[in-house]
Image (tube, grey):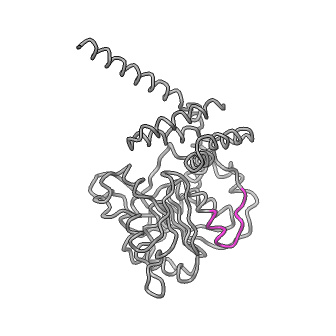
Amino acid sequence: MVKKILLSLLAVVLVLVAAGYWAYNLIDRDAFKHDFKNTQKADLPYITENIPEHRGKILTVVTSHSELGNTGKKVGYELTELSRAYYVFEANGFSVDIASPQGGKPPQVLDGDDMNQYDYAFLNDAAASKKLEHTFKLSEVNPDDYQAVYFVGGKGTMFDFIDNPDITRLVEHFYNNNKAIAAVCHGPAALIGAKNTQGDYIVANKAITAFTNDEELLLIPNAPEVFGQLLQDTLTEQGAKFSEGAMYLDNVEVDGNLITGQNPWSVWTMAEATIKQLGYTPKAREITAEEHAVTIMNTYHLQGSEQALAVAKSLLENQQPYMRNLVFIHSLMAFMQFDVVEGVSLLVFVQQLKNLT
């Protein structure tokens, strides 16, 4: 009996080792060889060439809050959610100001694994850096100076966007004057409590998206205690028709002058939707490898692996690379949710993607 048990355990260990080795070899290690850290704004034609004549100003708002409740962890605004939208706005003829509840230098969250050439160019952009060092204090901002406002995400917004009279003043001004309001990820926290001229919540009966409960709880299981609420729940309680897309993939809702994105992977679409809302056709740009991977994953969820594989094949045939590692990460997230079947299915899909190259 003991011998059989030991042999069974050995077989399980061998299977796990083999599975781990297989999964490890699915990682695209060549992707780690790209070094964008020295990218300059001048290196990116999208944001330096064929810029339209000045069309106006857009105000971006970031959090001033740096502490994740009593956890001891640091938070702030998400760089990628600022940098990408900032350059879309600039490339389409708008100058961009940056404000925060307290003014001055806001706390920043950097995740090197998620950053691309635009994000590093932003870090190396002297003009942008100066704006970040000296953000305008919200109480001193005149909303009449701007055609649109964009609320950048980051967990800090859950502490200093909600019930902030300066935030509410801005939101209500833009909404009641039919000017564009954009927000992404945790940024839609700015919409909570804001009302129209009839005294109704502005999100009531509006298609809205934001960082979902599932996305929040996967990373912070005790999020309701840390934040005092969940963003999806609060927006829904105030009457929003909440749109919940696939986790950590692009999902944007446009309802009237409200443009909201679900998470950091929604920034490009959200920013270009804002340009459309302002009455312009967004300037053409080269779609990033990350965006192509997001498209593949959205296709996978909506139409199945066969159609998603066809999308990937078409991209490669047209010399448009995609980030295979993002698909691999989604398989790991499935395992984190104890969805073994989905996790294995995604690993098999990653293998199929690898076989295309």
- Considering every residue shown, the one lying at the far front of the view is 1
Q: Nearer the viewer, residue 232 or 116?
A: 232
Residue 252 higher or lower than 9, as above or below:
below
Is residue 33 found left or right of 191 in the rendered image?
Answer: right
- Considering every residue shown, the one lying at the far top of the view is 3
Res. 38 visible in picture: yes
Q: Nearer the viewer, residue 244 or 203?
A: 244
Q: Position of residue 204 (x, y in %)?
A: 46, 76
Q: Nearer the viewer, residue 149 or 218?
A: 218
- Look at the image and say whether residue 164 sits in the magenta stretch: no
Magenta extent: 272-284
Q: Quadrant of the N terminus?
A: top left
| Residue beneath the point at 60% across and 51% down | 118
- Considering every residue shown, the one lying at the far left of the view is 2
Report which quarter residue 65 is drawn in. Answer: bottom left
Is residue 257 found left or right of 67 in the rendered image?
Answer: right
Q: Position of residue 42 (x, y in %)?
A: 68, 51
| Residue beneath the point at 72% across and 66% down | 281
Q: Position of residue 104 (x, y in %)?
A: 44, 65
Is residue 202 found left or right of 164 in the rendered image?
Answer: right
- Considering every residue shown, the one lying at the far bottom of the view is 198
Q: Quadrant of the C terminus?
A: top right
Res. 60 visible in picture: no
Q: Position of residue 168 (x, y in %)?
A: 43, 77
Residue 238 higher or lower than 318, as above or below:
below
| Residue beneath the point at 60% across and 62% down | 271
| Residue beneath the point at 40% across and 76% down | 193
